[in-house]
Image (tube, rainbow, N blue to C red):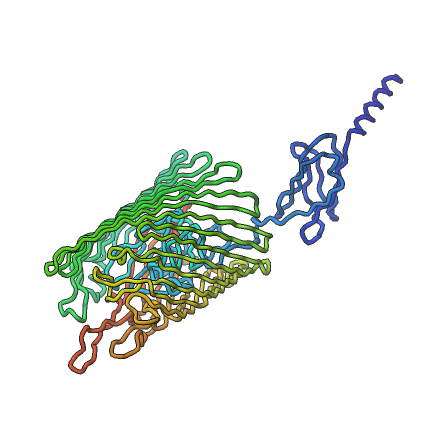
């Protein structure tokens, strides 16, 4: 018995001596103790929690080198790998998790529209339910500050830049002809269905080094990764009809959409200022295929559009009017892959291709052109830690353009070019803390046609001033190759350049968002020519320059009044430029000094209706009166429009929709055209350039057929 007790006592003593006690203290960066931190040895059940003083202590029986893990919500997990004998006492300071809710965001110059973005000012639903947008995402973005409402064009004019200074991307890949073909002073629309996209980033300046060849802005559209259900969508509207179907199986899904538009019913009801010989008609087909691999997603998009119309436009110099016949065919293909390579590496790769073909009869001049464009892209991203992430990549752009012009008086003229450019970039995201972050990058591009190499630095800094607000700074240089209208006549040119300087303030709290942004943008090397428009005998140079400066204000509130969501945006713009055939610096016709938008959306539960209104205001835009000596010497009347829409939920899967643009029939004037020669009194007569019609309306019925009987069709709008 004595031997047994002695043996037991000996074993107990040995085990007691084999135990090691780990002690320490856990605090945050300000020195405040952290209570409730979880402390344990990796791969064991040995551990403890810190007390109100941040202290912890626990005994272990393990030996040798081990890994101690300390974690707490909103802080980065701490790892310590060393000999157990060196783990006591410990003084641990946990770093704030820069990816947690409430951390600073790099947002200078960028408006995000996505449910998962911390900087979102819009949702995907906003894009298609804003009154006056009529389902066009471009029209919805024109209610944001920084844009000018150039209603006779329909494209994005950003901070004093013309529409050619904004590029559009789908899933990170360039869209070469993002807008439907149209004629002068008749607004265009985006080619793509708004229902394809689940996220949007609209940069009004200072955008990432990942993108280039745009002096003013980029619009990034992200397609849906995975549809929520199988369904069939039917759309019947007064100017067309649409059909869509989505199928899902295993790791795959396929969405197909088709839409036919014919404006004849609308043009027969609403008096037109254009003599339509053949009303605008288009047919669009789209398909998106998705496949989910174990560590990535492949998406393939294809879109084909046919457009055809004939019209006679009024012209002060041609009594019989200008006869225009246009047929356009556009094919766009986009393939992208995004996945993980392991060890915190991710890869994004893809290609896009576009073929755009036009047959144009302008009076007696027959023009046929064809453009093939290709974009290939590879991007790698390494996450070294929550605080440091590095992106780098390469891009290749290939463009082949040819055009043949025939005129019975001047004969035939042919032109063509092949424009290839290669770009490399790298960009780092550095989070010094939850309050301070830096994004810095550099982009280099080489163009073989124009024989230039340019380097563009970019940087953005953000600091969180309070838990609900922050300030940001951004700077960048941006280059853009001359446009097709110039390149088809001249290759001996440099790229145009702009430099952006941006200061941003952002406040977000409980459904309320306030943004204020000031900016200055300089232009150098703008293209000039000595004719009214680019021609084969024009003299071109890079002697143009200019500037744009202003303030953008945005306020959105969906909490103060029950069932009411609204936003207000205001832009002040001061800009002048010397480009094209301008004799000197002047404010271009598309730039209004003041732009204001008010958007409201009100849900009436008893009526099962969503009512939306949009009011747009623009101060008078400058135009040139040849009867005066000063260039761009007068301004048009102010621009006003009030748009209204009503969506009535017949059932969870059926909705009746009505919208009218310019409901009050404001008499807007965009510009004036003057005669080429003066009359007998030596005065140049003029005519006002107005919208093709005072109002535009849509009456439609939307029906979703799916197995999900509780699906809310209003959310699909």
Residue in the foreground of this view, choosing between 535 and 504: 535
From the viewer's side, name the closer residue of 443 and 203: 443
Residue lying at the far right in this picture: please name it.
Answer: 2
Residue extending furthest bottom?
681
Q: Is residue 544 above or below residue 628?
A: above
58 left or right of 449?
right
Q: How far from the left and from the top, in percent, is residue 710?
A: 42, 45
Is residue 305 something one can see in this rendering? no
Q: Which quarter of the figure is the N terminus placed in?
A: top right
Q: Along the horizontal axis of the image, is 338 left or right of 51?
A: left
Residue 103 relative to residue 370: left or right = right
Query: Exactly how many numbered labels are in the figure?
Result: 0
Q: Which residue appears at 81% of the width and 23% of the height?
A: 11
Q: Position of residue 114 (x, y in %)?
A: 45, 52
Q: Residue at x 42, y 59 (%)?
A: 204
Image quadrant assignment for residue 629: bottom left
Q: Is residue 375 above or below residue 691?
A: above
Q: Position of residue 155 (x, y in %)?
A: 33, 59
User: In this view of the protein, which residue sits in the foreground, 463 or 371?
Assistant: 371
Looking at the image, residue 338 sits to the left or right of residue 27; the answer is left
Q: Quadrant of residue 534?
A: bottom left
């Amino acid at each position: 018995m004595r031997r047994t007790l002695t043996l037991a006592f000996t074993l107990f003593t040995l085990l007691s001596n084999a135990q090691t006690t780990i002690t320490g203290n856990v605090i945050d960066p300000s020195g405040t103790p952290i209570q409730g931190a979880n402390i344990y040895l990796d791969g064991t059940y040995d551990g403890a929690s810190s007390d109100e003083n941040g202290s912890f202590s626990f005994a272990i029986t393990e030996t040798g080198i081990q890994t101690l893990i300390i974690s707490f919500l909103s802080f980065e997990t701490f790892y310590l790998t060393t000999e157990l004998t060196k783990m006591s006492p410990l003084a641990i300071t946990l770093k704030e998790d820069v990816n947690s809710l409430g951390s600073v965001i790099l947002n200078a110059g960028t408006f995000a529209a996505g449910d998962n973005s911390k900087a979102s000012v819009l949702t995907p639903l906003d894009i298609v339910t804003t009154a006056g947008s009529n389902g066009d995402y471009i029209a919805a973005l024109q209610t944001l500050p920084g844009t000018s409402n150039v209603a006779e064009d329909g494209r994005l004019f950003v901070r004093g830049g013309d529409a050619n200074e904004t590029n559009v991307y789908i899933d990170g890949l360039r869209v070469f002809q993002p807008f439907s073909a149209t004629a002068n002073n008749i607004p265009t629309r985006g080619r793509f269905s708004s229902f394809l996209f689940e996220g949007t980033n609209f940069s009004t300046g200072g955008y990432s080094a990942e993108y280039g060849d745009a002096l003013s802005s980029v619009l990034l559209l992200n397609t849906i990764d995975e549809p929520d259900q199988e369904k069939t969508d039917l759309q019947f509207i007064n100017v067309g009809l649409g059909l869509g179907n989505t199928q899902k199986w295993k790791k795959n899904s396929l969405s197909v959409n088709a839409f036919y538009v014919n404006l004849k019913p609308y043009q027969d009801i609403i008096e037109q200022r254009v003599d339509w010989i053949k009303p605008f008609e288009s047919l669009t087909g789209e398909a998106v295929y998705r496949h989910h691999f174990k560590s990535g997603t492949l998406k393939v998009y294809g879109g084909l559009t046919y457009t055809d119309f004939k019209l006679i436009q009024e012209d002060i110099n041609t009594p019989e009017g200008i006869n225009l016949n246009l047929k356009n065919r556009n094919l766009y293909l986009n393939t992208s892959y995004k996945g993980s390579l392991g060890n915190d590496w991710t890869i994004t790769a893809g290609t896009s291709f576009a073929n755009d073909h036009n047959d144009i009869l302008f009076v007696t001049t027959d023009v046929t052109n064809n453009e093939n464009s290709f974009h290939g892209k590879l991007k790698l991203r390494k996450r070294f830690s929550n605080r440091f992430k590095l992106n780098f990549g390469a891009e290749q752009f290939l463009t082949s353009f040819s055009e043949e012009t025939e005129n019975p008086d001047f004969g035939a003229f042919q032109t063509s070019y092949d424009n290839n450019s290669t770009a490399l970039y790298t960009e780092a995201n550095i989070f010094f803390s939850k309050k301070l972050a830096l994004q810095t990058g550099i982009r280099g591009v080489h163009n073989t046609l124009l024989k230039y190499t340019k380097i563009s630095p970019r940087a953005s800094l953000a600091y969180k001033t309070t838990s609900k607000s922050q300030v940001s700074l951004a700077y960048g240089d941006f280059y853009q190759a001359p446009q097709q209208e110039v390149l088809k006549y001249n290759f001996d040119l440099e790229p145009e350049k702009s430099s952006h300087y941006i200061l941003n303030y952002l406040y977000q709290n409980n459904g309320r968002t306030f943004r204020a942004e000031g900016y200055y943008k300089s232009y150098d090397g703008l293209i000039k020519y000595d004719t009214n428009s680019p021609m084969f005998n024009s003299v071109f140079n890079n002697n143009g320059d200019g500037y744009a400066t202003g303030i953008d204000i945005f306020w959105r509130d969906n909490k103060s009044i029950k069932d009411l969501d609204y936003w207000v945006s205001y832009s002040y713009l001061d800009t002048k430029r010397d480009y094209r055939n301008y004799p000197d610096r002047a404010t271009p016709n598309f730039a209004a000094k003041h732009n204001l938008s008010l958007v409201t959306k009100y849900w009436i539960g008893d009526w099962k209706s969503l009512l939306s209104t949009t009011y747009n205001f623009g101060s008078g835009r400058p135009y040139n009166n040849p009867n005066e000596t000063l260039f761009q010497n007068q301004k048009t009347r102010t621009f006003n429009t009030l748009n209204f829409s009503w969506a009535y939920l017949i059932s969870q899967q059926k909705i009746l929709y009505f919208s009218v643009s310019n409901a009050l029939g404001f008499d807007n004037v965009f510009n004036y055209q003057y005669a080429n020669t003066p009359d007998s009194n030596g005065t140049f007569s003029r005519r006002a350039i107005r919208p093709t019609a005072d109002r535009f309306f849509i009456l439609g019925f939307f029906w979703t057929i799916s197995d999900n009987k509780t699906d809310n069709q209003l959310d699909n709008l």
